[in-house]
Image (cartoon, rainbow, N blue to C red):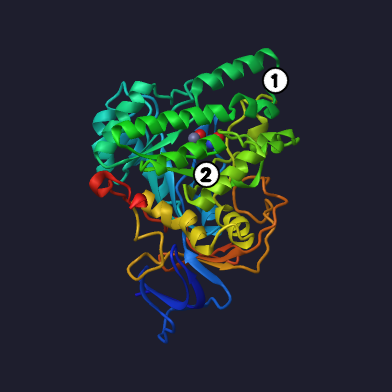
């Protein structure tokens, strides 16, 4: 029986902060006490360090095809990057091709991931096509451990968008079976029209990308999705929220008692739209785009006040050659940025070190809320006897510059090149095994396990209990 003892650390959970030793046996936490004087296969001294639950990144895109290429990170390099940043569980996406059965697509995706992953992993299922058997497959996919479905209000040209009637139909079916609806909410009509107008004026270089997807595009779609979710009683997860308008709608929906939550991403919390004036603007091209300083501050307010519940990375990275292949045309440049490795360092630096919020709120937004939202709590998302021994030991005194060399993504640049952290993970432990130590990988690929998830009991997310 493999055992690990983490001694003398300051343990922080969503609710508590205390000094304790933590013992793990066979991957599970078996004892938490002020002093554990027992032998273990590995003893780690965490004196002066903060021990938090492993991060949960509910939004990655490893091995994702886009615009004739595939994201630079596969499930191996992507999960190395995640683990190096203190993430011990990721939830990626299954995107069936047009007409493909959801079940077959899920099996293929599990097959691609299983021999490569360094941390535990699950999936959200993309629901793109109501002309197929997809509706009849929803219950089966849930029974296969995937109770969350992603729908799109845009990307018509890529065949991903659903019309309003279809959105309502899939929301009804998923929610009546206790599932979660994840939505990419941007108004397609506004975006398509803006692109057409920009094209006529010859304004397709990356700096014009944000003009094609303004705040109203997200704001309107978020409101519409909340209206639909309220009507059918759906648990709604608005992914990659980027705007003040969207955040205000989420806050108001929660005040009205709706089980609606938003995730934002590190890039919306660190940057504003001035990045699109840079010569390497294509590296910051993602959808929805980074918005104004006012929007950035509103997202922080959402995290501080508690309506923006999670931070996922939307990790979808392309190297500079892949970005350059799109030329000077934002409609052809693959969309997406890296991010899974920076969630914990950025939230610790900006949130805890800058005293925007407590260490407890940090744990909530990087781990516990996601575990509840994706229905894997308390197996994941906390430090408690019986929970998986997924822990990150943060050195609050370590300052790291997030250069391409320091980070582990399979790309040749860093959008955080000049960012200096205040604190950094010195060790990532997944199910009692040290996976990353002092920024070095020390575990074998393929050790990550599939995380089968269940529908919500009583059809309501425990995030709102
Ligand atoms: O630009 C982005 N976000 N690419 C990834 C796909 C998505 O829309 O989440
Ligand atoms: Zn999206
Ligand atoms: Zn995404």
Residue 303's spot in the image, x, y percent? 52, 50
Instruction: Count the marks.
Output: 2
Q: Secondary structure at mark 1?
A: loop
Q: Could you tell me which residue is drawn at 65 percent across and 18 percent down?
A: 198
Quadrant in the rendering for residue 56? bottom left
Residue 270's spot in the image, x, y percent? 64, 47
Q: Secondary structure at mark 2?
A: strand
Residue 317's spot in the image, x, y percent? 58, 41
**Residue at the spot of label 2:** 264
Can residue 199 be seen?
yes
Task: Specify the quadrant that holds the N terminus.
Answer: bottom left
**Which residue of the protein is positioned furthest toward the right in this rendering?**
279
* Number of the label disc, if any, that sits on residue 203: 1
Label 2 to label 1: alpha-carbon separation? 28 Å
Q: Could you tell me which residue is drawn at 66 percent across and 56 percent down?
A: 406
Q: Which residue is nearer to you in this view: 401 or 449? A: 401
Q: Residues within 10 Å of mark 2 (few under 14, many from 20)?
A: many
């Amino acid at each position: 029986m493999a055992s690990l003892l983490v001694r003398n650390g300051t343990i922080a959970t969503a609710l508590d902060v205390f000094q304790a030793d933590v013992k793990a046996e066979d991957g599970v936490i078996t004892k938490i006490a002020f002093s554990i004087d027992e032998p273990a296969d590995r003893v780690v001294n965490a004196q002066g360090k903060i021990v938090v639950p492993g991060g949960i990144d509910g939004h990655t895109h490893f091995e994702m095809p886009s615009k004739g290429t595939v994201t630079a990170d596969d499930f191996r390099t992507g999960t190395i990057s995640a683990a190096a940043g203190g993430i011990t569980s990721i939830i990626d996406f299954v995107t069936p091709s047009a007409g493909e059965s959801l079940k077959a697509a899920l099996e293929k995706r599990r097959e691609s991931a299983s021999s490569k992953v360094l941390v535990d992993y699950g999936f959200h299922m993309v629901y793109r096509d109501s002309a197929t058997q997809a509706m009849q497959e929803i219950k089966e996919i849930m029974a296969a451990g995937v109770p969350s479905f992603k729908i799109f209000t845009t990307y018509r040209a890529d065949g991903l968008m659903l019309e309003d009637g279809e959105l309502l139909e899939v929301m009804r079916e998923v929610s009546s079976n206790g599932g979660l609806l994840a939505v990419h909410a941007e108004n397609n009509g506004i975006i398509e029209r803006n692109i057409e107008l920009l094209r006529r004026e010859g304004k397709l270089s990356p700096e014009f990308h944000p003009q094609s997807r303004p705040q109203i595009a997200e704001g309107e779609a978020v409101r519409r999705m909340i209206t639909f979710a309220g009507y059918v009683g759906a648990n709604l997860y608005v992914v990659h929220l980027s705007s003040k308008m969207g955040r205000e709608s989420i806050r108001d929906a929660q005040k009205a008692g709706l089980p609606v939550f938003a995730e934002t991403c590190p890039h919306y919390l660190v940057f504003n739209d001035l990045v699109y004036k840079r010569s390497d603007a294509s590296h910051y091209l993602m959808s929805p785009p980074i918005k104004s300083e006012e929007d950035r501050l509103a997202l922080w307010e959402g995290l501080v006040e508690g309506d923006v519940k999670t931070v996922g990375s939307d990790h979808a990275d392309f190297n500079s050659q892949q970005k350059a292949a799109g030329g000077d045309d934002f409609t052809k440049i693959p969309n997406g940025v890296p991010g899974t490795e920076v969630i914990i360092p950025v939230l610790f630096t900006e949130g805890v070190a800058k005293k925007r919020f407590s260490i407890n709120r940090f744990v909530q937004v990087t781990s516990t809320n996601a575990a509840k939202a994706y229905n894997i709590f308390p197996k994941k998302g906390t430090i408690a006897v019986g929970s998986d021994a997924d822990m990150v030991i943060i050195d609050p005194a370590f300052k790291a510059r997030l250069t391409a060399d320091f980070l582990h993504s399979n790309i040749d640049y860093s959008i955080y090149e000049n960012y200096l952290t205040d604190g950094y993970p010195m060790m990532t432990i997944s199910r009692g095994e040290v996976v990353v130590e002092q920024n070095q990988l020390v575990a074998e690929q393929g050790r990550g396990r599939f995380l089968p998830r269940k529908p919500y009991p009583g059809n309501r997310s425990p995030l709102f209990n």
